[in-house]
């Protein structure tokens, strides 16, 4: 195995393991049995400040429409999103975050912030700032494929 292949395998092993560990820790602190995918959709809708179709959300999160439909059904059941027909195309639906969803997002952010802040503090601002451009570039390369 070449040094480049070994380096690539090490990088992706670290990313995958870190992702799993971070998801497990965040899931434990999220309120009301919220899942990471639920928070992610609520956060996306809150930041967008506009409605999105389920297909747009599925593309944004790189998941199937079925997976997004399942997440949206759970969020709607919890009262965190409103789903309405698209007035221009009856075959489509539009999704917006509800006031309860905004409150749930804020509660999730408040629950996650100490954990995330502590990790950044332990690593140090300089290391985190140095890692961000590399991680961003990797994400952009993966998204382009």
Image (cartoon, rainbow, N blue to C red):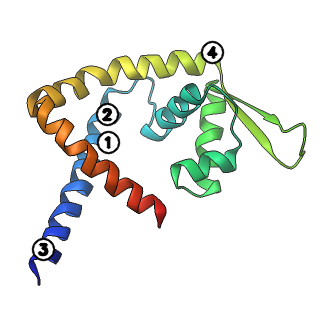
Q: Which mark is residue 6?
A: 3
Q: Which residue is mark 4?
A: 99
Q: Find numbered disc 4 in the image and state the secondary structure of the residue it sits on.
A: helix
Q: CA distance from mark 2 to mark 1?
A: 5 Å
Residue density around tag 1, few if under 14, some if 14–19, many if 20 or more, within 10 Å: some
Instruction: Choose the circle earlier in sequence order: 1 or 4.
Output: 1
Instruction: Choose the circle earlier in sequence order: 2 or 3.
Output: 3
Q: What residue is shown at x 68% (from left), y 45% (from top)?
A: 54
Is residue 20 placed above or below 114 in the rendered structure? below
Q: CA distance from mark 1 to mark 3?
A: 26 Å
Look at the image and tell me whether residue 20 can be seen.
Answer: no
Instruction: Choose the circle earlier in sequence order: 4 or 3.
Output: 3
Nearer-the-camera pick, 32 or 95: 95
Residue 122, given in percent of the width and then of the height, sits at 9, 29
Nearer-the-camera pick, 48 or 112: 48
Nearer-the-camera pick, 8 or 13: 8
Residue 114, given in percent of the width and then of the height, sits at 24, 20
The quarter of the image holding the N terminus is bottom left
Nearer-the-camera pick, 72 or 125: 125
Circle nearer the viewer, 1 or 3: 3
Is residue 20 placed above or below 12 in the rendered structure? above
Look at the image and tell me whether residue 27 can be seen.
Answer: yes
Q: Find numbered disc 2 in the image and state the secondary structure of the residue it sits on.
A: helix
Q: Which mark is residue 23?
A: 1
Answer whether labels 4 and 3 touch (C-beta < 8 Å). Answer: no
Instruction: Choose the circle earlier in sequence order: 2 or 4.
Output: 2
Q: Which residue is mark 2?
A: 26
């Amino acid at each position: 195995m070449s040094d480049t292949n070994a380096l690539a395998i090490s990088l992706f092993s670290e990313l995958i393991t870190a992702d799993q560990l971070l998801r497990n820790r965040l899931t434990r602190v999220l309120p009301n049995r919220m899942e990471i995918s639920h928070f992610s959709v609520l956060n996306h809708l809150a930041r967008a400040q506009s409605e999105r179709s389920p297909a747009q959300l599925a593309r944004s999160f790189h998941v199937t429409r079925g997976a997004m439909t399942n997440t949206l059904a759970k969020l709607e059941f919890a009262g965190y999103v409103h789903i309405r027909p698209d007035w221009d195309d009856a075959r489509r639906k539009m999704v917006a975050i509800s006031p309860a969803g905004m409150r749930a997002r804020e509660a999730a952010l408040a629950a996650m912030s100490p954990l995330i802040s502590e990790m950044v503090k332990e690593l140090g601002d300089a290391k985190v700032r140095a890692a961000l451009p590399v991680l961003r570039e990797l994400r952009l390369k993966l998204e382009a494929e």
